[in-house]
Image: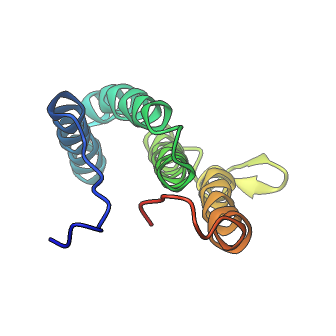
Amino acid sequence: MNDSENVYSIPVRFRKMENLHIVFWLLKDISWCMLWRPLGVAMVFPTLIISIMIAWRTRQMVSELTHNLAITFWISANSLWMFSEYFHFDEKVVLFGLTGKHSAMIPFCLGALMLLYYYAWWKPRHKHELETM
């Protein structure tokens, strides 16, 4: 490694939390795929809570914060979609003419807007700030 390279390190306790987050996320999605409703619903909460904690922990770096918020919106959208299928409102109009499944586009789009803000607005105006992306 070049001495002039910046290093971004994550404390082990945070890395362990991030790895556990992946386990919960996979359990949630496997449960959805296998139609294991109780486990799928139960896994939404630790997956979202850890995602929010990760975003909060990285709030000092805009690149990390925006990407972690986009992940939180993604998990929210994915969970809403899963709930709509589990509780049979996926084909029913529930919000602004959207079906339950399609209402998941709201948090999906919010996540995409977070990244659009970062890449199109914030990053070009802060070229010399230390960022991970």
Residue drawn at the location 45% of the way across and 67% of the way down: 133
Give the image location of residue 94, x and y in percent: 74, 44
Given residues 52 and 126, the one toward you in this image is 126
What is the quadrant of the N terminus in the image?
Answer: bottom left
Given residues 19 and 93, the one toward you in this image is 19
* Residue furthest right in the image: 96
Given residues 21 and 76, the one toward you in this image is 21
Residue drawn at the location 29% of the way across and 27% of the way down: 38
Q: Quadrant of residue 128?
A: bottom right
Give the image location of residue 42, x and y in percent: 32, 25
Q: Is residue 132 left or right of residue 23?
A: right
Give the image location of residue 68, x and y in percent: 47, 48
Q: In which quarter of the image is residue 123?
A: bottom right
Given residues 95 and 133, the one toward you in this image is 133
Residue drawn at the location 64% of the way across and 59% of the way down: 105
Q: Is residue 48 above or below residue 30?
A: above
* Residue furthest front in the image: 3
Q: In which quarter of the image is residue 119?
A: bottom right
Q: In this view, does 58 lie above or below 70?
A: above
Residue drawn at the location 21% of the way across and 34% of the way down: 11
Q: Is residue 29 above or below residue 57?
A: below
